[in-house]
Image (cartoon, helix red, strand yellow):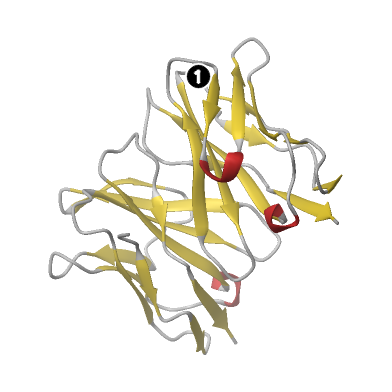
């Protein structure tokens, strides 16, 4: 069965420090991987995706993510966190060999402290 | 920048009543989706729609749910007889190709009382 795990409910980082939000996945076919961000009272905003090619993908707002096939992971990273990065982050996967629906992680609340 | 719009932003309804949630996807997109997020829980897939028909649906999408694209621009989700457990944030999304990133609306918060 397809699944996505975000092992941390919350991540706390000091402003200016690097941040990592973890995501692991399980699909039977080839994965398309996505990160979305949700600010309070807002919809889900696309950050970045991995489909094929370089394992390190760059996205919006200075975020990047590294696809690791052997570890089935797709961790979200940013070299220097901003207070404005505080939000809820969701990892999602699509099994391109079977369907187009997105399977979502539970979300990680990222808190950046000044 | 084109965006997906949803109306209303918040709807309160009595149990057993019918509700229609409305969405205007991005105009040149071909695939349309509904997801929901019960408070404090994961985002869950409900249904996808392509070429004027449902292409996938989840177990959640039972007979009380239906979708329609009545006029080539709107994409609606109807819940025929709402239950308390239907209370959730409902997100509409669309994309050009099924594998692309989906663009989401800001959601409709449905409260069933």
**Residue appearing at x 59%, y 40% in the figure:** A62
Tell me: A6 left or right of A61.
right
Residue B41 placed where, x, y %? 67, 57
- The quarter of the rendered structure image containing the C terminus of chain A is bottom right
Image quadrant of residue A11?
A: top right
Chain to which the residue tagged by mark 1 belongs: A
Residue B81 placed where, x, y %? 43, 78
The residue closer to the viewer here, A114 or B68, is A114
- The quarter of the rendered structure image containing the N terminus of chain A is top right
Residue denoted by label 1 = A28
**Dot 1, how many residues are within 10 Å of its Cα: few (below 14), some (14-19), or many (20+)?**
few
The residue closer to the viewer here, B49 or A78, is A78
Tell me: B17 left or right of A3.
left
Residue A18 placed where, x, y %? 78, 35
> Which residue, as the protein is rendered here, is positioned at the far top?
A70
Residue A83 placed where, x, y %? 75, 56
**Residue appearing at x 74%, y 39% in the figure:** A80
The residue closer to the viewer here, A85 or B79, is A85
**Residue appearing at x 30%, y 38% in the figure:** B98
**In the image, residue A66 above or below residue B91:** above
The residue closer to the viewer here, B60 or A26, is A26
**Residue appearing at x 57%, y 81% in the figure:** B111
């Amino acid at each position: 069965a397809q699944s996505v795990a975000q092992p941390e409910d919350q991540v706390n980082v000091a402003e200016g420090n690097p941040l990592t939000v973890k995501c692991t996945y399980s699909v039977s076919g080839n994965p398309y991987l996505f990160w979305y961000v949700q600010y309070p009272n807002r919809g889900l905003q696309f950050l970045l995706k991995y489909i094929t090619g370089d394992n390190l993908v760059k996205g919006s707002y200075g975020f990047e993510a590294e696809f690791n096939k052997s570890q089935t992971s797709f961790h979200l990273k940013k070299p220097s966190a901003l207070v404005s990065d505080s939000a809820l982050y969701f990892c999602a996967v699509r099994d391109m060999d079977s369907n187009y629906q997105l399977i979502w992680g539970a979300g990680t609340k990222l808190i950046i402290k000044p | 920048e084109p965006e997906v719009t949803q109306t209303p932003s918040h709807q309160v309804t009595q149990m057993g009543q019918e509700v229609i949630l409305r969405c205007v996807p991005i105009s040149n997109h071909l695939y349309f989706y509904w997801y929901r997020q019960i408070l404090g829980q994961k985002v869950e897939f409900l249904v996808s729609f392509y070429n004027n028909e449902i292409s996938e649906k989840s177990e959640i999408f039972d007979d009380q749910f239906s979708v329609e694209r009545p006029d080539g621009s709107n994409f609606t989700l109807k819940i025929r007889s709402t239950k308390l457990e239907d209370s959730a944030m409902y997100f509409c999304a669309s994309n050009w190709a099924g594998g692309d990133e989906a663009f989401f609306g800001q959601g409709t918060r449905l409260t069933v009382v």
